[in-house]
Image (cartoon, grey):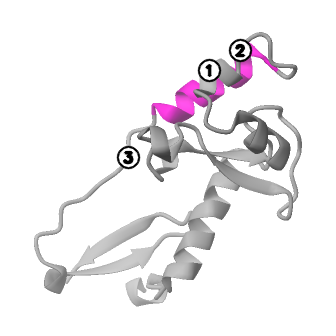
Amino acid sequence: DLLANLIVLTPKIARKRFRESIFQDWNWHCAYCDKQLSDRAATIDHIVPKHKGGHSTRNNLACACANCNRAKGSQPVFEYMSPAHQSYSEERVDKIKTWMEQKPCSLKITSTAQAVPYICHDATLGWIAT
């Protein structure tokens, strides 16, 4: 039964599933203007831009429409999402803050010879000790 859950992923497929899981967690809505997005219109925004120390980790990536992603550019997120923003709402700001506070899950594996990777239905990576 466990073997049925093991899936071998290429890096391309793993990235695609990772991105899709972010879109799904944002319910395919832009984090900044709440616009409903299609799979063709959705982009991923680094909440804290990479050149300002942001990483490509789940808690720093948000679903965004192309217009908001472009308009935010490299601005700090709460400077962009200020009360002056046309789509500003406390609810959206709180959701972004909560999203950013997610703790990344990690697991130290001392030897890959003793563990086999697999991906869960929700696109999270797991390990089975062998």
Q: Are marks 2 and 1 in contact (CB under 8 Å)?
A: yes
Q: Which mark identifies residue 82?
A: 2
Is residue 42 part of the magenta span, yes or no?
Answer: no
Contact flag, marks 1 and 3 (Cβ < 8 Å): no
Q: Quarter of the image containing the N terminus? A: bottom left
Q: Is residue 75 above or below residue 16?
A: above
Name the residue: 24% across, 59% down: 107
In this rendering, which labeled residue sits more in front, label 2 or label 3? 2
Q: In which quadrant is the C terminus drawn?
A: bottom left
Mark 2 and mark 3: Cα distance apart in space = 27 Å
Which element carries disc 3, helix, strand or loop? Answer: loop
* Frontmost residue, 34 versus 49: 49
**Rendering quarter of residue 81:** top right
Of the residues shown, which amino acid type is indicated by label 3? Pro
Q: Is residue 60 above or below residue 92?
A: below
Cα–Cα span, label 1 and label 3:
22 Å
Q: From the top left corner, tell me how far across and down residue 56 is, in percent.
A: 48, 53
Residue 90 percent coordinates (x, y): 72, 14
Is 68 situated left or right of 57 in this image? Answer: right
Tell me the residue at 49%/46% (across/down): 50
Q: Position of residue 65 (x, y in %)?
A: 81, 46
- Residue 6: quarter of image: bottom left
Amino acid at circle 2: Ser
- Lower position in the chain sequence, tag 1 or tag 3: 1
From this view, report whether residue 1 is shown above or below residue 17. below
Mark 2: secondary structure: loop
Which residue position holds label 3? 104
Nearest to viewer (mark 1 / mark 3)? 1
Mark 1 lies on residue: 78
